[in-house]
Image: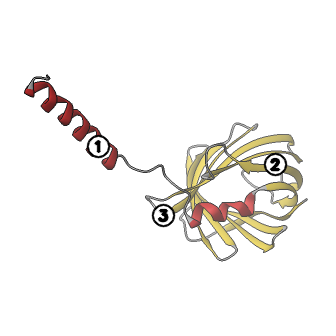
Amino acid sequence: MRAPGTMLGMVMVVMFAAVAAAQEPAAPQPTAEHKALEAWVGTWSGQGEMKPGPFGPGGPMSWTEECSWFEGGGFHVICRSQGTSAMGPMKGLGIIGYNAEKKVYTHYGVDSTGWSGFAEGSREGDTWTFQSKEMMGGTTFHSRATMTMTSPTTMSFSWGVSEDGSTWTVMMEGTTTKR
């Protein structure tokens, strides 16, 4: 025969385990905003024109970019790019996601010129807009990239900068097409 204390201990262990299991949060699931990132997935070929200015001499640019879902459940898209510009060959890595707590899209990026940055953005219909505040040569400037999906396989884009965040100068424009 079991001692009453042992039986009570077993009941308590089972009860606490059941309560703990009931309070354990479910694994996060992608939201509709995460699922919208599917628009970026694929292999893209792009071309554009960089305007002369503080970021270089300007001129034509061309690139390819491979974007795929990051492992683990449809929360982030990883894009690896390579291309050429007036400054020579370049490679880049970008991570596009959605921050459900802040309700903003996010972009983290690095490239072979030494640039790295973070931007937050929004999506209205087929237009995605990302903005950031960055520093170059001791000067703070605002950056804004606007990309519009003109079809499921074509996107036009524009990138501009501003010192005050309200007067913008377009620095690059172009198009990219999904293969």
Q: Position of residue 3 (x, y in %)?
A: 10, 23
Q: Amino acid at mark 2?
A: Glu
Q: Amino acid at mark 1?
A: Ala
In the rendered view, tell whether residue 148 sits above or below residue 178.
below
The Cα–Cα distance between marks 1 and 3, rounded to whole angstroms, is 34 Å
Q: Position of residue 128 (x, y in %)?
A: 66, 68
Work out whether residue 78 or residue 144 is closer to the camera in this orientation and state it. Answer: 78
Q: Amino acid at mark 3?
A: Lys
Query: Is label 1 or label 3 in front?
Result: 1
Query: Is label 1 or label 2 in front?
Result: 1
The tag earlier along the polypeptide, 1 or 2, is 1
In the rendered view, tell whether residue 173 sits above or below residue 91.
below
Residue 171 badge: none
Q: Residue at x 76, y 71 (%)?
A: 149
Determine the image quadrant of residue 156.
Answer: bottom right
The residue under label 1 is: 18
The residue under label 3 is: 103
The image quadrant where one finds the N terminus is top left
Q: Secondary structure at mark 2?
A: strand
The tag earlier along the polypeptide, 1 or 3, is 1
Q: Secondary structure at mark 3?
A: loop
Q: Residue at x 80, y 68 (%)?
A: 155
Q: Can residue 141 be seen at all in this image of the molecule?
A: no
